[in-house]
Amino acid sequence: MDIYYLILVVPTLIFSMIAQIMVKSTFSKYSSVRCSKNITGQDAASLLLRDNSISDVAIEPVQGSLTDHYDPGAKKLRLSEPVYAQPSIAAVGVAAHETGHAIQHAKHYGPLVLRSTLVPVANIGSSMGPWLAIAGLGFSFPLLINIGLLLFGGAVLFYIVTLPVEFNASARALAILKSGNVLTAEELKGVKKVLTAAALTYVASALTAIMNFLRLFLLSRSRRR
């Protein structure tokens, strides 16, 4: 029995499931609460971009739910169907958060630049790193274990750097919405709850990656003894 998996990884997987449930339930709750000023997700994104003098980012709808994202390569802000045209508190919150990433990109926000640089490393590290380390453990091949851990470590670093990027995007969104009197104080509380729930999913992902790395590291140490 892999005791490290039970102690380190299982709790983070449970936390991840709870975080997913929370973000879906919170988004669903505030998707049914209409903004007093009838502002849609697209309206909120346009407002935030305009307030930051960003005119080269396009806003377009994308299929699915909670599929919202900012594409820095194409300079496109893609908002999901429940966000793009809906005048709900949840829609405004999610759209504002994603616009926060576009603002970060325009201002060359350090952690975002670092995260973008780490994308290739993270893709390789998350897909190959753990398997190479496990193979090295199975065949008692220390070099393979070290290579796997090194690659996986790059992916873990990506998850860690993602946290300040996401937190900062939400902070920017809330600050602009508040200063622009876009929402009432009560509506801003709803937006904060939506963004806090979403932030928990990133924290859960980072913790899961860290604990998986720690598990493999401890297994390698035990094997070497």
Image: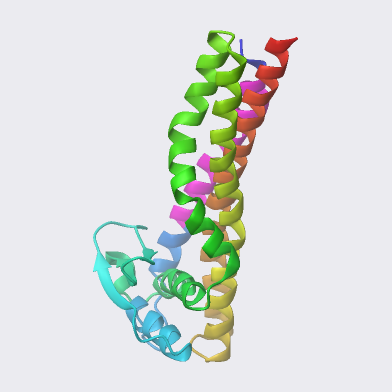
Please provide percent x and percent y for residue 122. 48, 44
Measured as percent of width and height from the top left, residue 133 is found at 55, 22
Which residue is nearer to you in this view: 142 or 107? Answer: 142
What residue do we see at 66% from left, 25% from top? 217
Helix, strand or loop for the magenta stretch, by majority: helix
Q: Quadrant of residue 141?
A: top right
| 195 horizontally vs 224: left or right | left
Residue range (magenta): 4-25
In the image, is residue 61 above or below residue 26?
below
Give me the residue at 62% from left, 41% from top. Answer: 207
Instruction: Give the position of the N terminus as an image quadrant.
Output: top right
Total labels drawn: 0
Decide whether residue 187 is among the magenta residues.
no
Indicate how the structure is coloured in the image: rainbow
Q: Is residue 39 left or right of residue 14?
A: left
| Place of residue 184 in the rendered image (x, y in percent of width and height, measured from the top left) | 53, 86
Q: Is residue 36 visible?
A: no
Query: Taking 121 as reference, is 99 above or below it?
Result: below
Q: Nearer the viewer, residue 183 or 58?
A: 58
Residue 35 can be seen, yes or no: yes
Q: Residue at x 70, y 22 (%)?
A: 218
195 and 115: which one is in front? 115
